[in-house]
Amino acid sequence: MKKSFAIAASLVLVALSGAAVADEQLEIGQKIYERAFGRGCGTCHDIASNPQLSANIKAGTLTRASFEKMLKEGKGGMPVAIAEIMKNKAVEKAGYGEDQAVDALYQYISSK
Ligand code: HEC
């Protein structure tokens, strides 16, 4: 009885810390999205004539790999963004590396 309670309690803790990590990731992704280049990705991407990131991810045309490539190389009117992302205060504070920061941004945009 006691043992099964301990197991159940630790399972709840694992689930809760997983949710907290996911929340932190989305929050950091949002901060990058809203603050990159001082005005956010949305100043360009929430305009209909530019690529609609969330819709493209949902449609399967914007993969995690092509997303990352675009951030690192830029293209046409799309500026290279990785350095800007890495100097975001929330990214620095969390101690995220490039992969984690790009993941957070990709997850946030997917959730929009
Ligand atoms: C100055 C305006 C501008 C800003 C700011 C900007 N983008 Fe872009 N982005 C563009 C344009 C324009 C394109 C289309 C480039 C092309 O295909 O020629 C683009 C393309 C992209 C693509 C490829 C989309 C697809 O479906 O092929 C991604 C991913 C992307 N941007 C992510 C971001 C993210 C994330 C940020 C914020 C860190 C950001 N962009 C900030 C203008 C901008």
Image (tube, grey):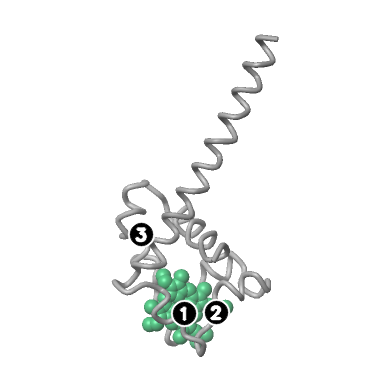
Residue 86 percent coordinates (x, y): 35, 59
Seen from the viewer's position, the closer of residues 69 and 87 is 87
Which numbered disc flags the more N-terminal residue, 3 or 1?
A: 1
Residue labelled 1 has its Cβ within 8 Å of some atom of ligand 1: yes
Which numbered disc flags the more N-terminal residue, 2 or 1?
A: 1
Check disc 3 and give the amino acid type: Met
Which numbered disc flags the more N-terminal residue, 3 or 2?
A: 2
Cα separation between marks 3 and 1: 20 Å
* Residue at (50% x, 43% y) in the render: 21
Q: Around disc 3, counting alpha carbons within 10 Å, would you say few (fewer than 14), some (14 to 19), or many (20 or more)?
A: some
Check disc 1 and give the amino acid type: His
Q: Is residue 88 above or below residue 58?
A: above
Check disc 2 and give the amino acid type: Gln
* Residue at (54% x, 59% y) in the render: 107
Q: Which mark is residue 45?
A: 1
Residue highlighted by disc 2 = 52
For label 3, the SS is helix
Residue highlighted by disc 3 = 86
Position of 16 compared to 24: left or right?
right
Residue labelled 2 has its Cβ within 8 Å of some atom of ligand 1: yes
Residue 1 percent coordinates (x, y): 70, 10
